Image: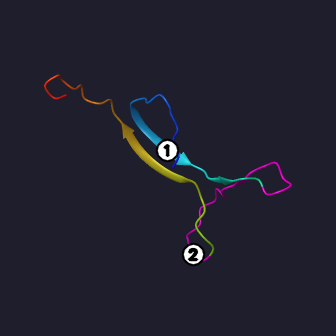
Amino acid sequence: IWRYDWPFVEGDHTFEVRCYEEAPEGQSDPVLQVTDPSPARPDGATGIHSRDAVVRAPEPVTEEEA
């Protein structure tokens, strides 16, 4: 599970995540996920995971609702 705190701004957004593995022994750079998309078969899916979303401010809660 991962988390990233950011100041939410209303509007249309695209959320993307890219995985990486720790650097192999003897190397300093991590192994980054391949960005070129390919299907899961035969060698496993690649590409950046992406989702579009609309962010809206929450409706105010009244004392009666709380």
Compared with residue 25, is residue 61 higher up or lower down, i.e. above or below? above
Q: Earlier in the sequence, mark 2 or mark 1?
A: 1
* Residue in the foreground of this view, choosing between 60 and 51: 60
Which amino acid type corresponds to the residue marked 2 in the rendered image? Arg
Q: Does 33 appear in magenta?
A: yes
Side of 14 where 42 appears, left or right: right
Q: Residues in magenta?
A: 24-42
Residue 13 locus on image (x, y percent): 45, 39
**CA distance for labels 2 and 1:** 25 Å
Q: Quadrant of residue 34?
A: bottom right
Q: Is residue 47 above or below residue 64?
A: below
Percent of width and height locating residue 19: 62, 53
User: Residue 15, which numbered label?
Assistant: 1
User: Which quadrant, please, contains the C terminus?
Assistant: top left
The percent coordinates of residue 36 (x first, y second) are: 64, 59
Q: Which residue corresponds to the image point at 64% horizontal and 56% vertical from the top-left?
A: 35
Which disc is residue 41 wearing? 2
